[in-house]
Amino acid sequence: MRGGYGARRERRIIIRAGFAAEGGNAAVQPREPANTPQGMLQCRGRRPGRNGLAMALCIVVVFGAGLRAYALDFQSLWTDEISSLMITDPTLPFRQFWDRVLTDTHPPIYYLVLRWSSSAFGQSEIVARAPSVLFGILTVCVAAILPGASLSCSSRVAFPLLLAVSPGAVWYAREARSYALLLLLSTLIVVACIRLLRCMPAEGRAARGPLTMLSVAALLASFTHYFGFLLTMAAFFACFLLVDSRHRGVVILSGCGAVALFMPWVVYHSRFITSEQASWIGELSIAASIDWFKHLAFGGTASLLVFIGLAIAVLVTGGWRNGVARNSTIGACALLCLLTLRGYDFASHANPDKPQYDRRSSGHICDCR
């Protein structure tokens, strides 16, 4: 009798200990991966949900591709596009082509791509804009594929959808200019930052891939447009602030490497351009920057209100605690935007030959020629 009573009492103690451990979040239940946000396991665990997510992403990519490729020659080439084609004229020897690149205000990567395209396929309106269309479609693909488990299901659909229908993204993907390539590389930088922040708390080795992607995309963006360098510095600084203190040294080393590789070009290029050519940066207030961003990203107040509603819905379904966490996707992207805008504001006020005019009244930002 005593043995049976003792065994039953021991079983009751074990059961109570199990309930206590479960309530205290002990290792009774399977542990979720460190880089998987709340709600993502449910999305991955259901086969129909995963197929539905893949179908939604495919529809978004196809829709975005249609917006960028439809009636590509509807409008004739405008001044900046003609300038791009003059610089990349395939009949010119490479030395003369390079001299024209050096007298332009932008780094050379896009011009190298457009020169190769012009040499292979000619310089018609469709051919001249085709690389930008490709970069625009790849931007939507990157937003749809690369985030992976770093974002929730709703965010994985919302991110490429917003890029697919963004007026500025569609507009620049239909021009023979470097901005579509810059947007592609900027999207890679943002995705790399998100994945890096998801990996850093517990999986140092898994962070090597996102850190490598961030470094490569940052260097290419810098050599595409000088604003890409501003985004590069903002990305590394944001990662430095948000990652675990044990990994900040790696982020600093990667950021310093990007600067060390890009600054020789800045010094070299500065020998061939004048301060008047650099005056296009101009003075741009924070309010004018926000107005221009709203115009490019949303096209108007109505679209902005729809976006705010969708953002609130995504935030509510994803959990507000996750949204306000220190290393959350929302917080990281907001910090990245603010740091980039502050970098532009600093560059604008550091220019001694900035023109004094208000772009809010002119309706658009400088030509960036």
Image: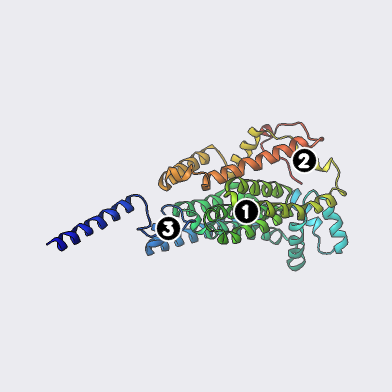
Percent position (x, y) of residue 152? 46, 53
Percent position (x, y) of residue 50? 42, 62
SS class, disc 3: loop
Location of the N terminus by quadrant is bottom left
Percent position (x, y) of residue 279? 80, 39
Q: CA distance from mark 2 to mark 1?
A: 25 Å
- Which is more N-terminal, label 1 or label 3? 3
**What label sits on residue 347 in the rendered view?**
none
Q: Give the residue at the far left of this rendering.
A: 1
Which residue shows up at 84% across the image and 64% down it?
91
Q: Give the residue at the far front of this rendering.
A: 2
Residue 53 in view, yes or no: yes
- Which is more N-terminal, label 2 or label 3? 3
Residue holding disc 1 = 189
Residue 321 lies in quadrant: top left
**What label sits on residue 280 in the rendered view?**
2
Residue holding disc 3 = 32
Q: CA distance from mark 3 to mark 2?
A: 50 Å
